[in-house]
């Protein structure tokens, strides 16, 4: 089955700096890659996603890039703010396989004021 | 407010007892999922359902069962709880005509088996 590895497990940045979280996946059939943000004690929430026919997608301060050949994708957060502090999860899924997502183990991002 | 409702919010359960975690969505999403979240292990899929009347096993299905009698409800049952089932359980749904869409998660159930 699919295996998703996520790095780093923890990341600390100064407010205003950029943060990058990287994920690799194993199943070349995966074609949908969402990112979730989970604040302490709350549910994961979808923040951005990318499909295999797109190399990059941006939404304000958040962007995701996908390299299908290398089977890796990354989340980029620019101009970080303290409210960006949370656990971020990447995931990979095959659209024809019930949409089941395999998650990475998460990255705890801390933005220091 | 549209979304997914999980109940109970938290529960302490004696080992060997059974319990059903409830999950209801009002978005008419076809697909529903149960994940458990353990510290350092991320989210692992227990069971899923493509559509009402069908279910499938995920990565860690042992000790759990599900049913999908209708579109809205997807209960998760622990037949005989063990301490290793202590976890936070999240129900999720997806509007899935086969293209792969992001999940909407419920607020979770924190289960402690003692």
Image (cartoon, coloured by chain):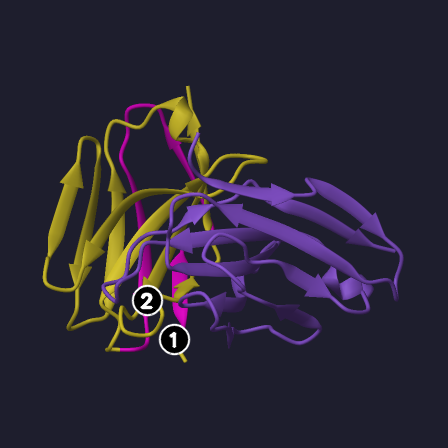
Query: What residue occupies the far bottom of the structure in this picture?
Result: A1
Write the residue at 42% across / 53% down.
B93
Chain seen in yellow: A
Along the line of sight, the residue nearer the viewer: B44 or B33: B33
Label 2 sits on residue: A93
Instruction: Answer with the quarter of the image where residue B34 lies.
Output: bottom right
Subunit bearing disc 2: A
Residue occupying the far front of the picture? B70
User: Could you tell whether A69 is left or right of A101 in the image?
Assistant: left
Q: Tell me, what hue is chain B?
A: purple
Q: Are marks 1 and 2 in contact (CB under 8 Å)?
A: yes
Residue A105 position, x and y percent, is 48, 58
Question: Which mark, residue A2?
Answer: 1
Q: Name the residue located 73 percent from the left edge and 42 percent from the top edge.
A: B10
Of tags 1 and 2, the one toward the viewer is 2
In the rendered structure, the answer to whether residue B39 lies left or right of residue B14 reads left
* Disc number placed over residue A76 in the picture, else none: none
Tell me where residue B8 sits by quadrant. Answer: top right
Is residue B35 rendered to the left or right of residue B51? right
Name the spot of residue A5 as percent of width and height, x first: 40, 65
Percent of width and height locating residue A17: 28, 30
Mark 1 or 2 closer to N-term?
A: 1
The magenta region covers: A3-27
Q: Estimate the x, y position of residue A47 in percent, counting from the top left.
A: 31, 41
x 33%, y 74%: residue = A97
Whether residue A8 is visible, yes or no, is: no
Q: How many discs mark residues in the rendered view? A: 2
Which structural element holds mark 1? loop
> Is residue B80 at least partly visible in the picture?
yes
């Amino acid at each position: 089955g699919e295996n998703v590895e996520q790095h780093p497990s923890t990341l600390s940045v100064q407010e205003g700096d950029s943060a990058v979280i990287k994920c690799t996946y194993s199943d070349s059939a995966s074609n949908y890659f969402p990112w979730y943000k989970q604040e302490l004690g709350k549910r994961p929430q979808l923040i951005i996603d990318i499909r295999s026919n797109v190399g990059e997608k941006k939404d304000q301060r958040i962007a995701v890039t996908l390299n299908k050949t290398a089977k890796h994708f990354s989340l980029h957060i620019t101009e970080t703010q303290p409210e960006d502090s949370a656990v971020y999860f990447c995931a990979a899924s095959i659209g024809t396989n019930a949409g089941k997502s395999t998650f990475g183990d998460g990255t705890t991002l801390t933005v220091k004021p | 407010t549209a979304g997914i409702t999980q109940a109970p919010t938290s529960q302490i359960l004696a080992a060997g007892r059974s319990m059903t975690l409830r999950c209801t969505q009002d978005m008419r999403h076809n697909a529903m999922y149960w994940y458990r979240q353990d510290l350092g292990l991320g989210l692992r899929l227990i069971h899923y359902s493509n559509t009402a009347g069908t279910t499938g096993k995920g990565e860690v299905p042992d000790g759990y069962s599900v049913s999908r009698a209708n579109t809205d409800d997807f209960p998760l049952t622990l037949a005989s709880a063990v301490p290793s089932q202590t976890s936070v359980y999240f129900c999720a749904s997806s509007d899935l005509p086969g293209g792969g869409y992001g999940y909407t998660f419920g607020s979770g159930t924190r289960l402690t088996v003692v």
